[in-house]
Amino acid sequence: MATVRKAIIPAAGLGTRFLPATKTVPKEMLTIVDAPIIFYVVEEAVQAGIEDIFLIQGRGKTAIEDFFDASYELEDRLEKDGKTYLLDRLLKIRSMANIISIRQKQPLGLGHAVLCGERVIGNEPFAVLLGDEIMLAQSGKPNATQHLVNLHKANQSTTVAVMNVPERDVSKYGIADLSAISEGYFKVKSFIEKPSIAQAPSRWAMPGRYVFSHDIFTFLKEAKQSLAGEIQLTDSMNELAKQKDVFASTFSAERFDAGDKLGYLKANVELALRNSELKDDFSKYLLELAQRIKG
Ligand code: UTP
């Protein structure tokens, strides 16, 4: 029985929704409270039992791999100053997992980014976590990736996270046509990338957490570029679903599209309210602000 030990985190996109900040700072390195977006994504993978993480990076994105590397000068200074809490945090980050960088030479789409990991994944199932989406697990519940890994243990097939979105948002996501197996668990009939409302078979959208069997690579290699010159992951998933069992599941985590300005701001507020150092003063401020806005 194949277990999921590896994950690909695509982080090589151009981040145009966040310009001008992303002209020089990778979107995945934008800060949520006191750590970059990518930290929360890697943390989720590690908590799900992933041992090897392949970060797909593009030009100008080396700050991401530096973040997970040692910083001897800084560590030395923190040790001398007795700032053990901060030192422990830095040491923990650099030993979180085996983090391996892979270069996507051109941002040719999410499907292409995943295909960049083919050689290192080999014949194993693997998780994919989008590098700009934060999923905050509910306490005592498995996180979104862990949930998919658990389902994969039982079904040994590609399994993806889905969530219900309002009709006006279907054109922003890959959408799945599903048939229910049990509460929140489905067999996938087909997928379509960013359909119009008229084309959409449902309102079940893919938020960016997947566990794939390695045969997805067969379809990614055969995939044709879209009109925009990209290889769409959703198109290859649709081909896979025609030939193999593919499953989908809802999840209990709270999701933030931190690559989008509003999602990013919400993630900052939500995580600040969970931060023991900030939550009292910050919630007081938010209540005062709400009063002021109300007039
Ligand atoms: P997005 O479509 O959200 O990223 O891809 P983007 O292209 O950077 O965003 P905008 O629309 O221009 O603002 C989801 C994830 O896939 C990665 C991105 O870095 C992001 O984490 N990605 C996307 C790649 O790694 N390579 C690509 O070619 C495209």
Image: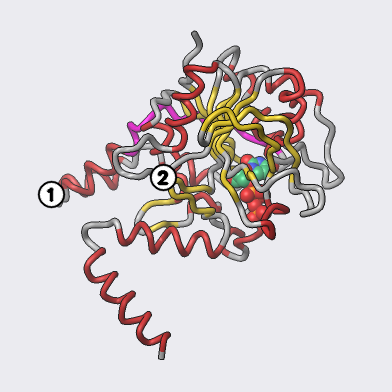
Residue lying farthest to the bottom in this orientation: 295
> In the figure, is residue 131 to the left or right of 119?
left
**Mark linked to residue 82:** 1
**Where is residue 2 shown, x and y percent of the image?**
50, 12
From which residue to which does the magenta span run?
A: 93-105
Residue lying farthest to the top in this orientation: 1
> In the figure, is residue 226 to the left or right of 187?
right
Q: Nearer the viewer, residue 153 or 104?
A: 153
* The C terminus: image quadrant: bottom left
Residue 279, by quadrant, is bottom left
Q: Residue shown at 31%/77% (left/top)?
A: 287
- The residues tagged by marks 1 and 2 sit, at their Cα atoms, a distance apart of 26 Å
Answer few, some or many: residues within 10 Å of disc 1's Cα (few below 14, many 20 plus, some between 14 and 19): few
> In the figure, is residue 112 to the left or right of 53?
right
Identity, as a three-letter code, of the amino acid under mark 2 = Tyr
Q: Nearer the viewer, residue 92 or 111?
A: 111
Precedes in sequence: disc 1 or disc 2: 2
Residue 66 visible, this orientation: no
**Mark linked to residue 40:** 2
The image shows a total of numbered marks equal to 2
Mark 2, secondary structure of its residue: helix
**Where is residue 170 shown, x and y percent of the image?**
69, 52
> Relative to residue 222, is residue 39 depicted above or below?
below
- On whether residue 39 falls in the magenta region, the answer is no
Q: Residue shown at 26%/44% (left/top)?
A: 89
Mark 1, secondary structure of its residue: loop
